[in-house]
């Protein structure tokens, strides 16, 4: 199984494993499926790829401090909405494919969204 429930930091050049942070417990059906870097943040998206999509699972986008890998925020997605890809843009916007929709978090889109 190539998917992991952890975020790992590797040293470029030597490929030594520097740090591992458990993102999901072993009994979870969620895996870290995609990553993007936005400024000083790492953004991860979760999915379940055991060959079936779980309609009752609330998948998520997590925002991590890039230096400490402390989880700063969890953004729950609609039930069954796996986060299949992420793209980080300058200005803090993060685009993602959630289920069958494109979602934008942060940046100018957040500033323009009414409260």
Image (tube, rainbow, N blue to C red):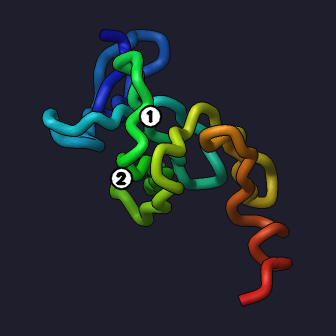
Q: Are marks 2 and 1 in contact (CB under 8 Å)?
A: no
Q: Position of residue 105 (x, y in %)?
A: 69, 60
- State the image quarter where residue 15 is shown: top left
Q: Residues within 10 Å of mark 1 (few under 14, many from 20)?
A: many
* First of labels 2, 1 by sequence position: 1
The quadrant of the rendering that contains the C terminus is bottom right
Q: Nearer the viewer, residue 73 or 31?
A: 31
Q: Secondary structure at mark 2?
A: loop
Q: Residue furthest left?
A: 27
Query: Residue visible at 48% across and 18% down?
Result: 12
Q: Horizontal placement of 37 versus 63: left or right?
A: right
Residue 109, relative to residue 31: is it above or below?
below
Please tell me the numbered disc located at residue 47.
1
Which is in the foreground here, disc 2 or disc 1? 1
Q: Nearer the viewer, residue 6 or 83?
A: 83
Q: Residues within 10 Å of mark 2 (few under 14, many from 20)?
A: few
Q: Nearer the viewer, residue 48 or 68?
A: 48
The residue beneath circle 2 is 68
| Mark pair 2, 1: CA separation | 23 Å
Q: Residue furthest front?
A: 55
Q: Position of residue 23 (x, y in %)?
A: 29, 43
Residue 77, relative to residue 102: is it above or below?
below
Whether residue 110 is visible: yes
Query: Residue visible at 50% across and 51% down?
Result: 61
Whether residue 88 is visible: no
Residue 113, relative to residue 31: is it above or below?
below
Query: Residue visible at 85% across and 78% down?
Result: 112
Please tell me the numbered disc located at residue 110.
none
Q: Position of residue 67 (x, y in %)?
A: 43, 50
């Amino acid at each position: 199984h190539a998917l992991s429930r952890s975020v790992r930091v590797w040293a470029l050049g030597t490929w030594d494993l520097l740090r591992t942070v458990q993102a999901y417990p072993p009994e979870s059906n969620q895996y870290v499926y995609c990553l993007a870097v936005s400024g000083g943040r790492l953004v991860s998206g979760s999915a379940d790829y055991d060959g079936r999509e779980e309609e009752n699972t609330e998948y998520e986008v997590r925002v991590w401090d890039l230096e400490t890998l402390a989880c700063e925020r969890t953004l729950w997605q609609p039930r069954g909405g796996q986060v299949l890809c992420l793209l980080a843009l300058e200005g803090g916007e993060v685009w993602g494919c959630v289920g069958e929709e494109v979602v934008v978090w942060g940046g100018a889109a957040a500033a323009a969204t009414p409260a």
